[in-house]
């Protein structure tokens, strides 16, 4: 089981920010928030944000995968948040998986 599968098992029901604001459910979280909460509960120095900003999510991605550079992490965070906010949670999980499994090509990028 990879890290995203583990996160999905712990946090199986992400929500759109719009829905959380409408429903006012304090236990809601987005896909990026699932990463932040998972990292926090596993002892990483990541704030337990349920709906992180792109920069907060990028920092969590870099904490989870030290192989990814900041530019890619920000791009991935934006992709995750955009897919999540449109309700395409499967795409958001795929973008997160791509970011957490990123490895630079040998001999450069």
Image: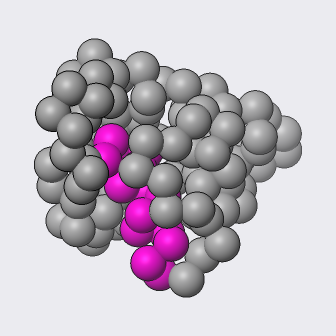
Give the position of the N terminus as an image quadrant.
bottom left
- The residue positioned 76% from the left and 32% from the top of the image is 71
Asked if 18 appears above or below 36 in the picture, the reply is above
Q: Position of residue 13 (x, y in %)?
A: 15, 49
Left of 14 or right of it: where is 30? right
**87 to 24, vertically: above or below:** above
Dividing the picture into quadrants, the one containing residue 85 is top left
- The answer to which of 94 and 17 lies nearer the viewer is 17
Residue 3 screen position, x and y as percent:
38, 65
Residue pictured at 44% horizontal, 29% vertical: 81
Q: Which residue lies furthest to the top in this view?
A: 86
User: Does residue 35 belong to the magenta stretch?
Assistant: yes
Question: What predominant SS class does the magenta segment belong to?
Answer: helix
The answer to whether 100 appears left or right of 26 in the picture is right
User: The magenta stretch spans which residues?
Assistant: 29-42
- Residue 23 in the image: state x and y as whole percent: 15, 33
* Quadrant where the image shows the C terminus: top right
Instruction: State the residue at coordinates (49%, 69%).
Output: 39
């Amino acid at each position: 089981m990879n890290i995203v599968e583990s996160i999905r098992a712990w946090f199986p029901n992400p929500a759109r920010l719009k829905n959380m604001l409408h429903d006012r459910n304090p236990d809601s979280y987005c896909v990026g928030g699932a990463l932040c909460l998972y990292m926090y509960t596993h002892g990483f120095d990541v704030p337990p944000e349920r709906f992180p900003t792109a920069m907060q999510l990028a920092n969590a991605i870099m904490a989870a995968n030290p192989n990814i550079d900041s530019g890619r992490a920000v791009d991935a965070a934006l992709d995750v948040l955009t897919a999540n906010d449109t309700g395409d949670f499967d795409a958001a999980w795929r973008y997160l998986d791509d970011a957490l499994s990123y490895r630079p090509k040998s001999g450069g990028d």
